[in-house]
Amino acid sequence: MRAPSSTLNSRTRAYSALGAAALFSGALAYVGLVDPHRPSSIFPACPFKLLTGWNCPACGGLRMTHDLLHGDFAAAAVDNVFLLVGLPALLAWILVRWRAQRPIFTAPAIVVIVVLAVTWTVARNLPGFPLVPTVLGG
């Protein structure tokens, strides 16, 4: 006998959610255990930085996450204050819009996100900008 489609759908969603949670937890554990501040650690290079030589808006995000997992908020802010503030703000925006059953990403919201990301990218690549992602020798 075949299972009803609603049971199959809910099982598929549950397994998908469990799989996604396991992948996220594993990735977070790896970032917490392996120090991305060390050049010898195995993390993928930023494609934007490889192509342009500039730090992208997310450069330093792995180091920021590692710092947060170790409770070092000052180092996390230096590594990427844009993501440190921006991601929780974006998540709050998404949750508020979703709960109000309104469109989440409207054209003005996308424009604001793009303008902020471009502004952050240009500002953090100016000579003498103090918040540069840290890389430790060794």
Image: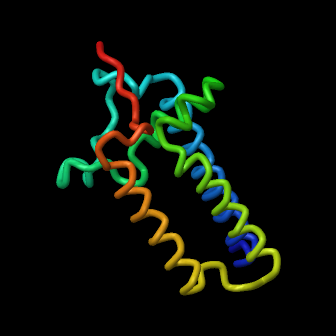
Q: Is residue 72 left or right of residue 123?
A: right
Toward the right, the furthest residue is 100
Give the quadrant of the N terminus: bottom right
The answer to whether 101 is drawn above or below residue 45 in the figure is below
Q: Which residue is nearer to you in this view: 131 or 67? A: 131
Count every numbered label the image shows and give the total: 0
**Colour scheme of this structure image?**
rainbow
- Name the residue located 38 percent from the left edge and 42 percent from the top edge: 129
Spot occupied by residue 43 in the image (x, y as percentages of width and height): 34, 35
Query: Which residue: 59% across, 85% down?
Result: 106
Provide residue 33's location: percent of width, then percent of height: 51, 22
What residue is rendered at 72% in x and 72% in y? 3
Name above or below for residue 11 compared with residue 83: below
Q: Position of residue 118 (x, y in %)?
A: 39, 65
In the displayed structure image, the side of residue 18 where residue 95 appears, left or right: right
Name which quarter of the figure residue 89 lies in.
bottom right
| Quarter that holds the C terminus | top left
Viewer-closest of 122 and 37: 122
Counting from the top left corner in percent of width and height, residue 59 is at 38, 45
Quarter occupied by residue 51: bottom left
Which is more toward the observer, 106 or 117? 117
Q: Tell me the residue at 75%/67% (across/down).
A: 95
With respect to residue 28, does 137 lie above or below?
above
Q: Residue furthest left?
A: 51
